Amino acid sequence: MSTLLPGRTIGLLGGGQLGRMTAIAAREMGYHVRVLDPDPACAAHGVVDGQVVAAFDDVEAAHVLARTCDVVSYEIERISPEVLDAVTAHAPLRPGAHVLRVVQHRGLQKTWLARHGFDVGPWQPADTLSQLHDAIAAAGGPVRIKVAQGGYDGRSQVRAEPGADAETIWHQLGGRPCVVEQEVALLAECSVLVARRPNGDSAVYPPARNWHEEGILDASLLPSGLPSALEMIVQHTAQRIAEALAVEGLLVVEFFAATNGRLYVNELAPRPHNSYHHAEAAGATGQFEQYVRALCDLTLGHTGMSRTAALSNLLGDLWRNDRTPHFHAALGVPGVHLHLYGKEPRPKRKVGHLIALGTHPEEALERLAEARRRLGHPMPTRPLRV
Ligand code: ATP
Ligand code: MG
Protein backbone atom coordinates (compact mmCIF):
# COMPACT_ATOMS: atom_id res chain seq x y z
CA MET A 1 0.00 0.00 0.00
CA SER A 2 1.46 3.34 -1.10
CA THR A 3 -0.82 5.68 0.84
CA LEU A 4 0.75 9.07 1.58
CA LEU A 5 -0.82 10.55 4.67
CA PRO A 6 -1.21 14.29 5.35
CA GLY A 7 2.10 15.87 6.27
CA ARG A 8 3.80 14.58 3.10
CA THR A 9 4.76 16.79 0.15
CA ILE A 10 3.12 16.91 -3.27
CA GLY A 11 5.10 18.34 -6.19
CA LEU A 12 3.37 19.91 -9.19
CA LEU A 13 4.81 20.71 -12.59
CA GLY A 14 2.90 23.86 -13.50
CA GLY A 15 1.59 26.58 -11.22
CA GLY A 16 -1.35 27.93 -13.25
CA GLN A 17 -4.91 28.05 -11.93
CA LEU A 18 -5.18 24.26 -11.82
CA GLY A 19 -2.01 24.10 -9.71
CA ARG A 20 -3.31 26.88 -7.50
CA MET A 21 -6.65 25.20 -6.80
CA THR A 22 -4.93 21.83 -6.28
CA ALA A 23 -2.54 23.44 -3.79
CA ILE A 24 -5.40 25.05 -1.87
CA ALA A 25 -7.21 21.69 -1.59
CA ALA A 26 -4.01 19.84 -0.66
CA ARG A 27 -3.03 22.32 2.03
CA GLU A 28 -6.54 22.21 3.46
CA MET A 29 -5.98 18.49 3.88
CA GLY A 30 -2.63 19.01 5.60
CA TYR A 31 -0.23 18.32 2.73
CA HIS A 32 2.71 20.47 1.72
CA VAL A 33 2.87 21.58 -1.91
CA ARG A 34 5.79 22.66 -4.08
CA VAL A 35 5.46 23.76 -7.70
CA LEU A 36 7.76 24.22 -10.64
CA ASP A 37 6.81 27.11 -12.92
CA PRO A 38 8.84 29.61 -14.94
CA ASP A 39 6.74 32.56 -13.76
CA PRO A 40 7.63 33.73 -10.23
CA ALA A 41 4.18 35.36 -10.07
CA CYS A 42 2.30 32.29 -11.35
CA ALA A 43 -1.25 31.71 -10.08
CA ALA A 44 -0.10 29.13 -7.51
CA HIS A 45 2.50 31.51 -6.12
CA GLY A 46 1.41 32.58 -2.65
CA VAL A 47 -0.63 29.46 -1.88
CA VAL A 48 2.22 26.92 -2.06
CA ASP A 49 4.96 26.05 0.41
CA GLY A 50 7.65 26.56 -2.18
CA GLN A 51 8.30 27.22 -5.86
CA VAL A 52 11.13 26.27 -8.14
CA VAL A 53 11.24 29.03 -10.73
CA ALA A 54 12.38 27.28 -13.90
CA ALA A 55 11.34 26.33 -17.40
CA PHE A 56 9.41 23.11 -17.96
CA ASP A 57 12.37 21.60 -19.83
CA ASP A 58 14.89 22.37 -17.05
CA VAL A 59 16.12 18.93 -15.96
CA GLU A 60 18.19 20.22 -13.02
CA ALA A 61 15.20 22.12 -11.69
CA ALA A 62 13.05 18.98 -11.98
CA HIS A 63 15.60 17.16 -9.80
CA VAL A 64 15.48 20.00 -7.27
CA LEU A 65 11.67 19.84 -7.11
CA ALA A 66 11.27 16.07 -7.00
CA ARG A 67 14.04 15.47 -4.45
CA THR A 68 11.88 17.08 -1.76
CA CYS A 69 8.55 15.53 -2.82
CA ASP A 70 6.77 12.27 -1.98
CA VAL A 71 4.74 12.29 -5.20
CA VAL A 72 4.81 14.51 -8.29
CA SER A 73 2.03 15.36 -10.74
CA TYR A 74 1.47 17.96 -13.46
CA GLU A 75 -1.18 20.42 -14.58
CA ILE A 76 0.35 20.91 -18.01
CA GLU A 77 1.08 18.33 -20.68
CA ARG A 78 4.10 19.93 -22.38
CA ILE A 79 6.79 18.19 -20.37
CA SER A 80 9.91 16.71 -21.96
CA PRO A 81 10.83 13.02 -21.44
CA GLU A 82 14.09 14.14 -19.76
CA VAL A 83 12.17 16.08 -17.13
CA LEU A 84 9.88 13.10 -16.54
CA ASP A 85 12.95 10.88 -16.06
CA ALA A 86 14.44 13.37 -13.62
CA VAL A 87 11.25 13.36 -11.57
CA THR A 88 10.89 9.59 -11.48
CA ALA A 89 14.46 9.26 -10.16
CA HIS A 90 13.16 10.68 -6.85
CA ALA A 91 9.40 10.21 -6.53
CA PRO A 92 6.48 8.49 -8.23
CA LEU A 93 5.04 10.51 -11.12
CA ARG A 94 1.24 10.28 -11.26
CA PRO A 95 -0.25 9.86 -13.81
CA GLY A 96 2.78 8.04 -15.19
CA ALA A 97 5.00 9.00 -18.14
CA HIS A 98 3.22 6.43 -20.36
CA VAL A 99 -0.02 8.45 -19.99
CA LEU A 100 1.65 11.70 -21.00
CA ARG A 101 3.28 10.06 -24.00
CA VAL A 102 -0.14 9.05 -25.34
CA VAL A 103 -1.90 12.29 -24.49
CA GLN A 104 0.80 14.82 -25.49
CA HIS A 105 0.39 14.27 -29.20
CA ARG A 106 -3.07 14.53 -30.76
CA GLY A 107 -2.24 12.03 -33.50
CA LEU A 108 -0.82 9.45 -31.09
CA GLN A 109 -3.75 9.97 -28.77
CA LYS A 110 -6.31 9.35 -31.52
CA THR A 111 -4.41 6.31 -32.77
CA TRP A 112 -4.23 4.89 -29.25
CA LEU A 113 -7.96 5.50 -28.69
CA ALA A 114 -8.95 3.93 -32.00
CA ARG A 115 -6.69 0.93 -31.38
CA HIS A 116 -8.46 0.39 -28.06
CA GLY A 117 -11.88 0.51 -29.71
CA PHE A 118 -12.90 4.13 -28.95
CA ASP A 119 -14.46 6.17 -31.75
CA VAL A 120 -12.60 9.45 -32.39
CA GLY A 121 -14.38 10.43 -35.61
CA PRO A 122 -12.82 10.84 -39.05
CA TRP A 123 -9.36 12.44 -39.04
CA GLN A 124 -6.06 12.44 -40.93
CA PRO A 125 -2.52 13.23 -39.80
CA ALA A 126 -0.77 16.01 -41.72
CA ASP A 127 2.96 16.14 -41.05
CA THR A 128 3.75 18.11 -44.19
CA LEU A 129 2.14 20.83 -46.28
CA SER A 130 1.28 18.41 -49.04
CA GLN A 131 -0.39 16.02 -46.58
CA LEU A 132 -2.37 18.97 -45.23
CA HIS A 133 -3.47 19.87 -48.73
CA ASP A 134 -4.57 16.28 -49.43
CA ALA A 135 -6.38 15.92 -46.10
CA ILE A 136 -8.41 19.11 -46.61
CA ALA A 137 -9.32 17.96 -50.12
CA ALA A 138 -10.24 14.44 -48.97
CA ALA A 139 -12.48 15.57 -46.08
CA GLY A 140 -15.26 16.72 -48.38
CA GLY A 141 -16.58 19.24 -45.82
CA PRO A 142 -15.42 21.69 -43.15
CA VAL A 143 -12.44 20.58 -41.05
CA ARG A 144 -10.70 21.54 -37.81
CA ILE A 145 -6.94 21.63 -38.22
CA LYS A 146 -5.05 21.42 -34.94
CA VAL A 147 -1.33 21.35 -34.24
CA ALA A 148 -0.42 17.91 -32.95
CA GLN A 149 1.40 19.22 -29.89
CA GLY A 150 1.01 22.19 -27.60
CA GLY A 151 -2.39 23.74 -28.42
CA TYR A 152 -4.97 24.61 -25.74
CA ASP A 153 -8.12 26.73 -25.31
CA GLY A 154 -8.72 26.60 -29.04
CA ARG A 155 -5.27 28.11 -29.73
CA SER A 156 -3.21 26.67 -32.55
CA GLN A 157 -6.23 25.41 -34.41
CA VAL A 158 -8.06 26.61 -37.47
CA ARG A 159 -11.44 25.87 -39.05
CA ALA A 160 -11.32 25.47 -42.81
CA GLU A 161 -13.91 25.06 -45.56
CA PRO A 162 -13.32 22.76 -48.53
CA GLY A 163 -11.00 24.43 -51.01
CA ALA A 164 -9.23 26.47 -48.31
CA ASP A 165 -5.62 27.36 -49.06
CA ALA A 166 -3.51 24.75 -47.29
CA GLU A 167 -0.31 26.80 -47.56
CA THR A 168 -1.77 29.79 -45.71
CA ILE A 169 -3.06 27.53 -42.94
CA TRP A 170 0.21 25.60 -42.74
CA HIS A 171 2.14 28.84 -42.17
CA GLN A 172 -0.52 30.23 -39.84
CA LEU A 173 -0.01 27.16 -37.60
CA GLY A 174 3.76 27.58 -37.66
CA GLY A 175 4.54 24.84 -40.19
CA ARG A 176 4.11 22.15 -37.56
CA PRO A 177 2.64 18.64 -37.78
CA CYS A 178 -1.16 18.75 -37.46
CA VAL A 179 -4.21 16.60 -37.29
CA VAL A 180 -7.10 17.32 -39.65
CA GLU A 181 -10.47 16.45 -38.13
CA GLN A 182 -13.73 16.43 -39.97
CA GLU A 183 -15.98 19.00 -38.33
CA VAL A 184 -18.62 17.20 -36.31
CA ALA A 185 -22.22 18.48 -36.38
CA LEU A 186 -22.67 18.75 -32.63
CA LEU A 187 -25.81 17.84 -30.74
CA ALA A 188 -24.03 18.38 -27.43
CA GLU A 189 -20.60 18.38 -25.85
CA CYS A 190 -19.88 16.82 -22.51
CA SER A 191 -16.96 15.69 -20.38
CA VAL A 192 -16.46 13.01 -17.76
CA LEU A 193 -14.01 13.04 -14.87
CA VAL A 194 -12.57 9.77 -13.59
CA ALA A 195 -10.33 9.48 -10.54
CA ARG A 196 -8.18 6.38 -10.18
CA ARG A 197 -5.91 5.35 -7.32
CA PRO A 198 -2.61 3.51 -7.67
CA ASN A 199 -4.35 0.53 -6.05
CA GLY A 200 -6.78 0.44 -9.02
CA ASP A 201 -9.90 1.77 -7.29
CA SER A 202 -11.69 4.33 -9.42
CA ALA A 203 -14.61 6.74 -9.14
CA VAL A 204 -16.47 8.36 -12.01
CA TYR A 205 -18.33 11.67 -11.84
CA PRO A 206 -21.63 12.49 -13.50
CA PRO A 207 -20.97 14.13 -16.90
CA ALA A 208 -20.73 17.90 -17.29
CA ARG A 209 -22.40 19.50 -20.32
CA ASN A 210 -20.17 22.05 -22.01
CA TRP A 211 -20.67 24.97 -24.39
CA HIS A 212 -17.69 26.49 -26.18
CA GLU A 213 -17.25 29.90 -27.81
CA GLU A 214 -14.39 30.28 -30.29
CA GLY A 215 -12.78 27.12 -28.96
CA ILE A 216 -12.82 28.26 -25.30
CA LEU A 217 -15.12 26.74 -22.70
CA ASP A 218 -17.79 29.38 -22.12
CA ALA A 219 -20.30 27.61 -19.88
CA SER A 220 -20.77 24.25 -18.27
CA LEU A 221 -23.55 22.51 -16.37
CA LEU A 222 -23.12 19.79 -13.75
CA PRO A 223 -24.80 17.35 -13.73
CA SER A 224 -25.34 17.62 -17.47
CA GLY A 225 -29.10 17.28 -17.75
CA LEU A 226 -28.48 15.10 -20.83
CA PRO A 227 -30.51 11.89 -21.29
CA SER A 228 -29.48 9.29 -18.72
CA ALA A 229 -28.76 6.68 -21.41
CA LEU A 230 -26.14 9.01 -22.90
CA GLU A 231 -24.77 9.84 -19.46
CA MET A 232 -24.29 6.16 -18.68
CA ILE A 233 -22.49 5.47 -21.97
CA VAL A 234 -20.03 8.34 -21.57
CA GLN A 235 -19.33 7.47 -17.94
CA HIS A 236 -18.69 3.85 -18.83
CA THR A 237 -16.49 4.85 -21.79
CA ALA A 238 -14.43 7.27 -19.70
CA GLN A 239 -13.89 4.67 -17.01
CA ARG A 240 -12.74 2.12 -19.61
CA ILE A 241 -10.25 4.64 -21.01
CA ALA A 242 -8.87 5.44 -17.55
CA GLU A 243 -8.50 1.72 -16.92
CA ALA A 244 -6.84 0.98 -20.26
CA LEU A 245 -4.38 3.86 -19.71
CA ALA A 246 -3.82 2.79 -16.09
CA VAL A 247 -4.19 6.40 -14.96
CA GLU A 248 -3.12 7.18 -11.41
CA GLY A 249 -4.70 10.54 -10.64
CA LEU A 250 -7.41 12.17 -12.74
CA LEU A 251 -8.50 11.71 -16.33
CA VAL A 252 -11.06 13.87 -18.10
CA VAL A 253 -12.55 12.64 -21.36
CA GLU A 254 -14.17 15.22 -23.64
CA PHE A 255 -16.99 13.86 -25.84
CA PHE A 256 -18.85 15.05 -28.91
CA ALA A 257 -22.43 13.77 -29.28
CA ALA A 258 -23.05 14.18 -33.01
CA THR A 259 -26.35 14.82 -34.77
CA ASN A 260 -25.77 11.58 -36.72
CA GLY A 261 -26.24 9.65 -33.46
CA ARG A 262 -22.55 8.83 -33.06
CA LEU A 263 -20.54 9.51 -29.96
CA TYR A 264 -16.91 10.55 -30.44
CA VAL A 265 -14.05 11.02 -27.98
CA ASN A 266 -12.72 14.53 -28.67
CA GLU A 267 -9.68 14.50 -26.41
CA LEU A 268 -8.18 13.42 -23.09
CA ALA A 269 -6.74 15.45 -20.22
CA PRO A 270 -4.83 13.57 -17.46
CA ARG A 271 -5.36 16.28 -14.83
CA PRO A 272 -8.04 18.49 -13.27
CA HIS A 273 -10.21 20.15 -15.90
CA ASN A 274 -11.97 23.47 -16.42
CA SER A 275 -15.30 21.68 -16.89
CA TYR A 276 -15.29 20.32 -13.31
CA HIS A 277 -14.57 23.44 -11.26
CA HIS A 278 -18.20 23.31 -10.06
CA ALA A 279 -18.03 19.73 -8.75
CA GLU A 280 -17.17 20.99 -5.29
CA ALA A 281 -20.25 23.23 -5.18
CA ALA A 282 -22.69 20.71 -6.66
CA GLY A 283 -21.49 17.54 -5.00
CA ALA A 284 -19.70 15.90 -2.14
CA THR A 285 -16.12 15.94 -3.44
CA GLY A 286 -14.47 18.64 -5.53
CA GLN A 287 -12.09 17.61 -8.31
CA PHE A 288 -9.05 19.06 -6.54
CA GLU A 289 -9.68 17.17 -3.31
CA GLN A 290 -10.30 14.02 -5.35
CA TYR A 291 -7.05 14.62 -7.23
CA VAL A 292 -5.12 14.82 -3.95
CA ARG A 293 -6.82 11.65 -2.72
CA ALA A 294 -5.95 9.80 -5.93
CA LEU A 295 -2.32 11.03 -5.98
CA CYS A 296 -1.84 10.04 -2.34
CA ASP A 297 -3.65 6.71 -2.73
CA LEU A 298 -6.34 7.63 -0.21
CA THR A 299 -9.94 6.37 -0.30
CA LEU A 300 -11.72 8.28 -3.06
CA GLY A 301 -14.56 10.66 -2.21
CA HIS A 302 -18.21 10.22 -3.11
CA THR A 303 -18.94 11.58 -6.60
CA GLY A 304 -22.73 12.06 -6.34
CA MET A 305 -24.26 15.49 -6.90
CA SER A 306 -26.88 16.93 -4.58
CA ARG A 307 -27.40 20.21 -6.46
CA THR A 308 -26.94 21.59 -9.94
CA ALA A 309 -24.17 24.06 -10.67
CA ALA A 310 -23.53 26.13 -13.77
CA LEU A 311 -20.11 27.57 -14.51
CA SER A 312 -18.82 30.38 -16.68
CA ASN A 313 -15.23 31.24 -17.35
CA LEU A 314 -14.13 34.82 -16.86
CA LEU A 315 -11.65 35.97 -19.50
CA GLY A 316 -9.32 38.93 -19.20
CA ASP A 317 -11.41 40.74 -21.84
CA LEU A 318 -13.89 41.63 -19.07
CA TRP A 319 -11.44 44.09 -17.50
CA ARG A 320 -12.24 46.92 -19.91
CA ASN A 321 -10.00 49.99 -19.64
CA ASP A 322 -8.32 48.37 -16.61
CA ARG A 323 -11.56 48.58 -14.61
CA THR A 324 -12.53 45.71 -12.33
CA PRO A 325 -15.86 44.22 -13.53
CA HIS A 326 -19.03 44.71 -11.43
CA PHE A 327 -18.51 41.67 -9.24
CA HIS A 328 -20.47 43.32 -6.46
CA ALA A 329 -23.60 43.28 -8.64
CA ALA A 330 -23.02 39.75 -9.91
CA LEU A 331 -22.59 38.43 -6.38
CA GLY A 332 -26.02 39.83 -5.55
CA VAL A 333 -27.59 36.98 -7.53
CA PRO A 334 -28.55 34.18 -5.12
CA GLY A 335 -26.32 31.11 -5.33
CA VAL A 336 -23.54 32.87 -7.31
CA HIS A 337 -19.91 32.47 -6.28
CA LEU A 338 -16.76 34.10 -7.64
CA HIS A 339 -13.32 32.53 -8.10
CA LEU A 340 -10.36 34.58 -9.32
CA TYR A 341 -6.92 33.12 -9.92
CA GLY A 342 -4.73 36.16 -9.24
CA LYS A 343 -3.70 36.34 -12.90
CA GLU A 344 -3.16 39.53 -14.81
CA PRO A 345 -6.22 40.06 -17.04
CA ARG A 346 -5.27 39.79 -20.70
CA PRO A 347 -7.58 39.20 -23.68
CA LYS A 348 -8.65 35.55 -24.15
CA ARG A 349 -6.86 34.59 -20.92
CA LYS A 350 -8.83 32.61 -18.32
CA VAL A 351 -8.51 34.60 -15.10
CA GLY A 352 -11.41 33.21 -13.06
CA HIS A 353 -14.84 31.66 -13.11
CA LEU A 354 -18.35 32.14 -11.78
CA ILE A 355 -20.43 29.35 -10.32
CA ALA A 356 -24.22 29.54 -9.95
CA LEU A 357 -25.98 26.95 -7.83
CA GLY A 358 -29.56 25.88 -8.36
CA THR A 359 -31.98 23.20 -7.32
CA HIS A 360 -32.44 22.28 -10.99
CA PRO A 361 -30.57 23.00 -14.27
CA GLU A 362 -32.81 25.84 -15.47
CA GLU A 363 -32.45 27.69 -12.18
CA ALA A 364 -28.65 27.35 -12.17
CA LEU A 365 -28.40 28.51 -15.79
CA GLU A 366 -30.79 31.43 -15.24
CA ARG A 367 -28.79 32.61 -12.22
CA LEU A 368 -25.58 32.32 -14.20
CA ALA A 369 -27.12 34.29 -17.07
CA GLU A 370 -28.29 37.02 -14.68
CA ALA A 371 -24.84 37.29 -13.06
CA ARG A 372 -23.26 37.56 -16.50
CA ARG A 373 -25.73 40.24 -17.58
CA ARG A 374 -24.74 42.23 -14.49
CA LEU A 375 -21.07 41.90 -15.49
CA GLY A 376 -21.84 43.15 -18.99
CA HIS A 377 -20.93 39.69 -20.29
CA PRO A 378 -24.27 38.25 -21.46
CA MET A 379 -24.70 34.60 -22.40
CA PRO A 380 -24.40 33.95 -26.13
CA THR A 381 -27.69 34.55 -27.94
CA ARG A 382 -28.28 30.90 -28.78
CA PRO A 383 -30.40 29.45 -26.02
CA LEU A 384 -28.60 27.57 -23.28
CA ARG A 385 -31.38 25.00 -23.16
CA VAL A 386 -30.88 21.75 -21.34
P1 ATP B 1 -9.24 22.80 -24.44
O1 ATP B 1 -7.82 22.61 -24.07
O2 ATP B 1 -9.84 24.02 -23.90
O3 ATP B 1 -10.10 21.60 -24.25
P2 ATP B 1 -8.35 22.56 -27.14
O4 ATP B 1 -7.52 23.68 -27.61
O5 ATP B 1 -7.70 21.29 -26.73
O6 ATP B 1 -9.27 23.09 -26.00
P3 ATP B 1 -10.40 21.13 -28.63
O7 ATP B 1 -11.00 20.48 -27.44
O8 ATP B 1 -9.80 20.27 -29.64
O9 ATP B 1 -9.35 22.29 -28.27
O10 ATP B 1 -11.48 22.04 -29.34
C1 ATP B 1 -12.12 23.11 -28.65
C2 ATP B 1 -13.58 23.17 -29.07
O11 ATP B 1 -13.69 23.45 -30.48
C3 ATP B 1 -14.34 21.86 -28.88
O12 ATP B 1 -14.74 21.67 -27.55
C4 ATP B 1 -15.49 22.07 -29.87
O13 ATP B 1 -16.44 22.99 -29.36
C5 ATP B 1 -14.78 22.72 -31.04
N1 ATP B 1 -14.27 21.66 -31.94
C6 ATP B 1 -13.02 21.17 -31.96
N2 ATP B 1 -12.88 20.18 -32.87
C7 ATP B 1 -14.09 20.04 -33.44
C8 ATP B 1 -14.61 19.16 -34.47
N3 ATP B 1 -13.84 18.26 -35.09
N4 ATP B 1 -15.92 19.29 -34.80
C9 ATP B 1 -16.71 20.22 -34.19
N5 ATP B 1 -16.27 21.06 -33.22
C10 ATP B 1 -14.99 20.98 -32.84
MG1 MG C 1 -10.87 20.44 -25.52
Image (cartoon, helix red, strand yellow):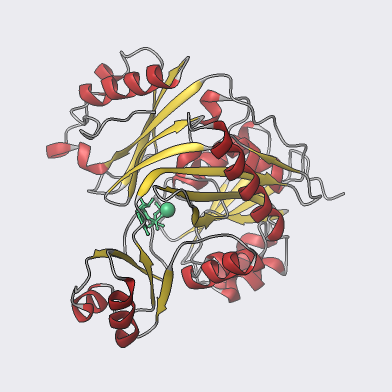
Query: Is residue 102 depicted above or below 225 in this figure?
Result: below
Residue 53 seen in the current view: yes
Viewer-side residue, 175 vs 318: 175
Question: Which residue sits at x=46%, y=40%?
Answer: 275
Q: Is residue 179 left or right of residue 112?
A: left
* Residue at far front of view: 260
User: Across the whole image, how many numbered discs are drawn on residues?
Assistant: 0
Ligand 1, seen in the image, is in the quarter at bottom left
* Residue at far left of view: 321
Question: Which residue sits at x=55%, y=71%?
Answer: 111
The C terminus lies in which quarter of the figure? top left
Q: Quadrant of residue 231?
A: top right
Residue 77: x and y in percent read 51, 62
Query: Is residue 310 depicted above or below 275 in this figure?
Result: above
Question: Which residue sits at x=42%, y=45%?
Answer: 43
Residue 304: x and y in percent read 63, 27
Query: Is residue 309 depicted above or below 120 in this figure?
Result: above
Q: Quadrant of residue 228?
A: top right
Viewer-side residue, 168 vs 10: 168
Residue 44 seen in the current view: no
Residue 320: x and y in percent read 15, 37
Q: Quadrant of residue 365?
A: top left
Residue 360: x and y in percent read 46, 17
